[in-house]
């Protein structure tokens, strides 16, 4: 799975969690919280949707790894690979 | 049957908690004592007409796009859209005292202008106060109690203004007599004056049906006429419930919307005694009059009127069955988009004394009701002089009705004055949400369910 795929899967989740957010110009290195006005409830939702859709677990101490789109891709990349390999 | 989570009560908070949990694939079952959903906010049919109880207004109304507002959060969390509740904003409402009237609408500027007009010396202080409320984070779960009366008398000078603010806010959410926890005051002040009032054309049933449909579409199970007789404990853990039918269900977590004291009672006499008293004392009667025309056509245009006939506002259990000196008038057809309703509805809510209604035999109960129905017509004529001539049907619910449908002891609409904001009880996997968690209003109740489900189930697993 290439980075762009992962990026799209994350944006899909954000589109579900925050359907009113404008996702057309998300900048990779800027905190999602600041760009999209996401709150802690939204972040919990992103984590929960990752588990529901992709069977990926994000422990609480790693929530900060989801701060930006770039950091999401870096952190979730290996997890997506592991899940895909396990299938 | 074994579940991840059992929820006691299919009110707003239980349904919202259930949607969150079912959406994330928890095995969840909501147990409702009655054949009707909604708990405190419900509806029924009588003589061919639809009646609403509870809901006067959906407070916390914000238009589509106000992302950080409670309504938007609720919709996002439940994967609903702004259109799902079909909310129509109010026109205008007012707080009416003998020497002052304050109008307000969903535009905060009107309310501030009105306060400045009626109380010119308070202009700066009131603006500062509004700003203080705006900045206050009332969603926090760990705020220590502060007396609203003390805060208000510290920030403002005009006693009449303090009383008028208290009258409106307390009627829409205070479980405490004559005072209120400041954090709850802030929640309700934002919900009414900084956000606004709205109503679905079909009334509360629209909201309840939307939540039930959403819950079921997520795979949640809902069992009606399934009252809980007791919560089964194993030392300090809840292991399940026994229904009134005798059936036992087990679960890893139990969330109760039954009220704090009421929930402790379900855990046994000892637990109830340990929890102490603390159930609420405030109840209401509400009379719903059906008119052959809309109140607007008879000159009554306000959506909601909070009224008080004295200088000082007394918010306490009255000695008499009903305290007629203050109350709330609500006209559902005075929301926008309600003009084509075939009949008008005029509701008055008053404070009531539970004990004066509860112990009566059927005949005395009916007699007392008849007496207050006559009083209703008389009081309504203060707003619509020709009221009696247009009245075609009327129904009244009392503290007794409230107790029956909410299960709240004493018919305490707003539950116990003591709130468990983080939802925890002394039993480690038993949590409280809804009225006794402490978020207020319909949107607040649903957010209460969401918050407790998120905090104690979803972010733990």
Image (cartoon, rainbow, N blue to C red):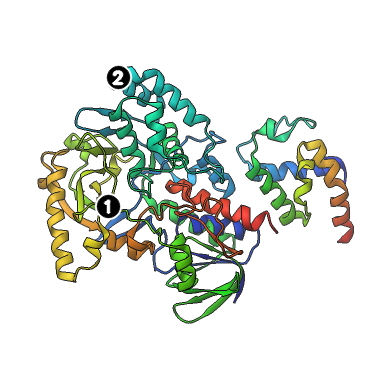
Most foreground residue, A46 or B319: B319
Q: Which residue, given by chain and number where applicable, does mark 1 sit on?
A: B317
Residue nearer the viewer, B345 or B175: B175
- Please indicate, yes or no, whether residue B107 appears anywhere in the rendered image: no
Task: List x then y, in percent, for residue B10.
Answer: 46, 62
Instruction: Please tell me in which quadrant of the rendered image residue B5 appears.
Output: bottom right
Work out whether mark 2 precedes mark 1 in sequence or the reverse, and give the earlier one: 2
Above or below, A49 relative to B152: below
- Callout 2: few (<14), some (14-19), or many (20+) C-alpha neighbours within 10 Å? few
| Chain for numbered disc 1 | B
Is B9 situated above or below B392?
Answer: below
Residue neighbourhood size for the residue with mark 1, other residues' Cα within 10 Å, grouped as few (<14), some (14–19), many (≥20): many
Q: Are marks 2 and 1 in contact (CB under 8 Å)?
A: no
Q: Where is the N terminus of chain B found, in terms of image quarters?
A: bottom right
Mark in the foreground, 2 or 1: 1
State left or right for residue B123 relative to residue B428. left
The picture places residue B141, in percent across and down from the top left corner, at 56, 46
For disc 2, the chain is B
Q: Name the residue: 85% across, 51% down.
A: A79
SS for dot 2: helix
Q: Are marks 2 and 1 on the same chain?
A: yes
B73 to the left or right of B200: right
What label does residue B117 carry, if any?
2
Please identify the quadrant where the C terminus of chain B is shown. Answer: bottom right
Q: How many marks?
A: 2
Q: Position of residue B54 (x, y in %)?
A: 34, 52
Residue B335, given in percent of the width and then of the height, sits at 33, 38
* Residue at the image position 13 percent from the left and 59 percent from the top: B370
State the separation of the CA atoms marked 2 and 1. Answer: 33 Å
Q: Is residue A3 left or right of residue B171?
A: right
* Outermost residue, bottom side: B246
């Amino acid at each position: 799975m290439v980075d762009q795929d992962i990026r799209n899967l994350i944006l899909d989740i954000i589109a579900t969690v925050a359907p009113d957010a404008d996702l057309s110009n998300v900048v990779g290195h800027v905190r999602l919280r600041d760009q999209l006005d996401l709150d802690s409830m939204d972040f919990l939702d992103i984590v929960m949707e990752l588990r529901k859709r992709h069977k990926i677990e994000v422990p609480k101490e790693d929530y900060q790894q989801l701060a930006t789109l770039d950091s999401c891709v870096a952190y979730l990349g290996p997890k997506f690979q592991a899940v895909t390999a396990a299938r | 049957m074994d579940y991840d989570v059992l929820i006691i009560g299919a009110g707003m908070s239980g349904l919202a908690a259930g949607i969150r949990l079912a959406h994330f694939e928890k095995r969840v079952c909501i147990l409702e004592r009655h054949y009707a959903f909604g708990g405190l906010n419900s509806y029924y049919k009588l003589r061919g007409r639809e009646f609403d109880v509870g809901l006067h207004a959906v407070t916390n109304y914000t238009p589509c796009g106000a992302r950080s507002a409670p309504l938007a959060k609720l919709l996002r969390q439940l994967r609903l859209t702004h259109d799902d509740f079909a909310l129509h904003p109010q026109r205008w409402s007012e707080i009416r005292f003998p020497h002052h009237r304050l109008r307000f609408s969903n535009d905060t500027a009107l309310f501030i202008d009105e306060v400045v007009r009626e109380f010119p010396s308070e202009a700066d202080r009131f603006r500062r106060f509004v700003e203080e409320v705006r900045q206050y984070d009332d969603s926090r779960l760990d705020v220590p109690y502060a007396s609203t009366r003390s805060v208000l008398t510290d920030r403002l000078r005009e006693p009449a203004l303090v009383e008028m603010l208290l009258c409106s806010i307390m009627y829409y959410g205070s479980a405490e007599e004559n005072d209120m926890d400041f954090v709850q005051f802030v929640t309700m002040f934002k919900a009414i004056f900084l956000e606004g009032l709205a109503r679905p054309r079909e009334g509360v049933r629209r909201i309840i049906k939307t939540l039930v449909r959403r819950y079921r579409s997520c795979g949640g199970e809902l069992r009606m006429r399934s009252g809980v007789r007791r919560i089964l404990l194993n030392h300090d853990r809840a292991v399940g419930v026994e229904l009134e039918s005798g059936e036992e269900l087990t679960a890893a977590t139990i969330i109760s919307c039954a009220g704090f004291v009421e929930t402790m009672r379900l855990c046994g006499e000892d637990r109830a005694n340990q929890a102490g008293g603390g159930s609420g004392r405030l109840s209401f009667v509400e009379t719903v009059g059906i008119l052959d025309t809309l109140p607007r056509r008879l000159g009554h245009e306000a959506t909601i009127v909070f009224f008080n006939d004295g200088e000082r506002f007394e918010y306490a259990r009255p000695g008499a069955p009903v305290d007629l000196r203050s109350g709330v008038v609500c006209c559902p057809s005075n929301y926008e988009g309600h003009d084509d309703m075939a009949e008008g509805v005029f509701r008055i809510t008053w404070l009531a004394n539970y004990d004066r209604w509860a112990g009566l035999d059927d005949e005395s109960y009916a007699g007392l009701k008849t007496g207050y129905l006559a009083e209703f017509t008389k009081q309504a004529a203060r707003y619509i002089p020709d009221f009696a001539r247009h009245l075609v049907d009327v129904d009244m619910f009392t503290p007794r009705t409230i107790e029956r449908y909410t299960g709240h002891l004493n018919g305490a609409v707003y539950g116990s004055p003591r709130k468990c904001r983080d939802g925890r009880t002394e039993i480690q996997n038993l949590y409280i949400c809804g009225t006794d968690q402490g978020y207020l209003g319909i949107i607040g109740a649903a957010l209460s369910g969401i918050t407790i489900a998120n905090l104690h189930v979803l972010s733990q697993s």
